[in-house]
């Protein structure tokens, strides 16, 4: 299975800057077979732009969130069918910034994942502990609780999700989990998936949290780290491409 390197632009970008960034990435990929599967998860207003820049390229695109509702009176929300209109392959669900600043519960995250899968969009389900939880020895119980809610909701489709382990204390802080720390949690998640699906090895379990060009290779060398969810470093073409190359 090829590794998956997914960028999460968060609330960054602009038409002109996106155009330059994506073209620089595509230029850098010319000629060689890409070392990993790739995706860029961008703010919803730029999905049309990414679709036009990336179609017929090796980079897929996706959203950073999706509504748990099908349609109707939900001001500001974006539905799965809207994401489908722009041929999104992925939608991040349950990013810690959504859980933390927008009050998303495990139950909400689970319905979002279910809604995405039902529409043929692969949810990238984020799980991760805060520093307080880690210090209290709760890392395993927190990530298992978060993943269990999604497994319960998507049931026999569990092998079709992507999981991203993102320790909250490592996101955007420059503090990365060591490869050993990350691997330990990935192994826990793999075991949990194995209890829910016959094909736990088919599920990409990504690491996210200050992954960059310098630390990517050692993280990606771990047996249960199947790729990365990249925030800051996905805003620089050279850094993103170096992480992709490290996935070989
Ligand atoms: P970071 O973000 O790479 O900037 O730490 C990762 C994420 O939040 O997905």
Image: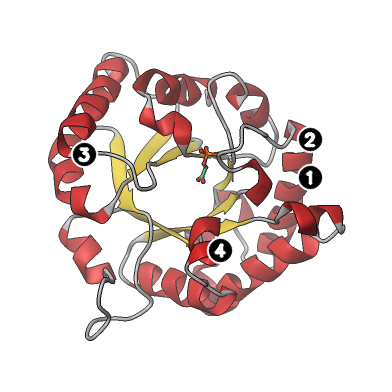
Mark 1 or mark 3: which is in front? Answer: 3
Residues at circles 2 and 4 in contact by the CB criterion of under 8 Å:
no
Marks 3/4: CA–CA distance: 25 Å
Q: Earlier in the sequence, mark 3 or mark 4?
A: 3
Question: Residue 180 bears which disc, if any?
Answer: 2
Residues at circles 3 and 4 in contact by the CB criterion of under 8 Å:
no
Q: Which residue is mark 3?
A: 14
Q: Which residue is mark 1?
A: 184
Q: Residue at x 12, y 41 (%)?
A: 52
- Please provide percent x and percent y for residue 197: 61, 65
Marks 2/4: CA–CA distance: 26 Å
- Please provide percent x and percent y for residue 225: 63, 39
Up-down relation of residue 94 to residue 61 (above or below): below
Question: Residue 100 bears which disc, if any?
Answer: 4
Residues at circles 1 and 2 in contact by the CB criterion of under 8 Å:
yes
Mark 2 or mark 3: which is in front? Answer: 3
Color scheme of the displayed model: secondary structure
């Amino acid at each position: 299975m090829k590794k998956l390197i997914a960028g999460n632009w968060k609330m960054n970008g602009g038409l002109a800057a996106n155009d330059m960034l994506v073209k620089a990435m595509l230029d850098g990929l010319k000629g060689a077979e890409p070392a990993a599967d790739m995706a860029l998860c961008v703010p919803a207003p730029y999905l049309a732009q990414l679709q036009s820049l990336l179609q017929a390229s090796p980079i897929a695109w996706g959203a950073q969130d999706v509504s748990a509702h099908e349609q109707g009176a939900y001001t500001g929300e974006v539905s799965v069918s809207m994401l489908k209109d722009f041929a999104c392959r992925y939608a991040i669900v349950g990013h810690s910034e959504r859980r933390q600043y927008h009050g998303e519960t495990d139950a909400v995250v689970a319905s979002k994942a279910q809604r995405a899968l039902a529409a043929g969009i692969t949810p990238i389900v984020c799980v991760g502990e805060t520093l307080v939880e880690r210090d209290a020895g709760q890392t395993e119980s927190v990530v298992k609780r978060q993943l269990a809610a999604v497994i319960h909701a998507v049931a026999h489709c569990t092998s079709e999700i992507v999981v991203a382990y993102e320790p909250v204390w490592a996101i955007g802080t420059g503090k990365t989990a060591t490869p050993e720390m990350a691997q330990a949690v990935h192994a826990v998640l793999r075991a949990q998936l194995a209890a829910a699906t016959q094909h736990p090895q088919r599920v990409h379990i990504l690491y996210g949290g200050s992954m960059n060009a310098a630390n990517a290779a050692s993280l990606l060398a771990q047996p249960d780290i199947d790729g990365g969810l990249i925030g800051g470093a996905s805003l620089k073409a050279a850094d993103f491409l170096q992480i992709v190359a490290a996935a070989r």
